[in-house]
Image (spheres, rainbow, N blue to C red):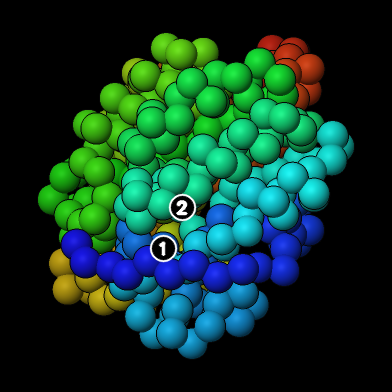
Amino acid sequence: MRFEIYRAESASILSPTSGFIAQAGFTHSLSPARNCTFACTYCYVPTMRIYGGLKPDDWNHWGRFTTFKSNAPSLLRASLRPHQTIYCSPLVDPYQPAEETECMMPRLLDELIARPPHVFAIQTRGPLILRDLARLERLAARTTLRVSFSITTDSERVRRLYEPHCAPTPKRLETVRRLRAAGIAVYATLAPLLPCDPEALIDLAVDATDRDIIGDPFHVRAVKKCGATTRDAGVRISRAQGFSEWHDPAFQAAVVERMRQRAATAGRRFATGPQAFAWLAETLAEIDNDSNCERSFGTIGN
């Protein structure tokens, strides 16, 4: 995979949240770069265009380059506050391929360790996160740390169609297990839900984690009238491969219900949308309270 790496100074590093992420309980988001070299065909970010802080070259050449915020560590040092609940990142995978040589995340983690926020959540699909395991352990000792690790399908053929530059599913599951073994609170996040055997995918998540399971189907305009949606490249692959039903809201709802029932048999919750992503923003006390409510009143459906 060929891509270019650029660097530019940014005016800010922490952005007040809105929409989906705000509804989940996060106060700020942190994006260390602009444009993601995973280049996933379905990625919703380029559909946000200027509303996602992108420039025309970003959405027209998605995945071919990334622009790191060169002054991100110093900006973060000046911006961190103890009350913040931070999501990293809604706009770029912090462990994208370009991060391997840029090494931006270790510098940001050092700032977070020195000035820990209330909650810090990392959303990634990159096994490269294990490079920073020692720093993650130090951060987890100082604040509520969550890792949300994306696992999209149980089929390697499907994965190669939609996200050819991402790690194979077995490698991702092994990464989740290693994070868990190190004491990191790690969630299997089945998002977006690519064509799969729904029960088999839930079983993989249950086996790899000890936590509730997060999911989200493809974004579709029939449900989400405005804002980010599935990138056209992903939709074209679905049409060509006979997977168009995975973009149909009724079909998606049926798949989600099957997955919820399968998770429930293992004693886990499965949910989608802000309700599920809110688990990443919770403190340990809030999680304990939720668990007590579940035992008293039964499992909440999706």
Give 100 or 186, whichever is nearer the viewer. 100
**Residue 26 location, x and y as percent?**
74, 46
Q: Give the quarter of the figure containing the C terminus.
A: top right
Residue matched to label 1:
36
Crowding at label 2, few (<14), some or many (≥20) Cα neighbours within 10 Å?
many
Q: Is residue 176 above or below residue 74?
A: above
Looking at the image, residue 225 sits to the left or right of residue 204; the answer is right
Q: Is residue 91 above or below residue 109?
A: below
Looking at the image, residue 292 sits to the left or right of residue 131; the answer is right
**Residue 191 location, x and y as percent?**
43, 48
Q: Residue at x 39, y 85 (%)?
A: 60
Report the amino acid beneath label 2: Asp
Residue 225: in sight, yes or no? no
Q: Are marks 1 and 2 in contact (CB under 8 Å)?
A: yes
The kind of secondary structure element at disc 1 is: loop
The kind of secondary structure element at disc 2 is: loop
Looking at the image, residue 246 sits to the left or right of residue 215; the answer is left
Q: Is residue 158 above or below residue 239?
A: above
In the picture, the disc for residue 93 is 2
Report the amino acid beneath label 1: Cys
In the picture, the disc for residue 295 is none
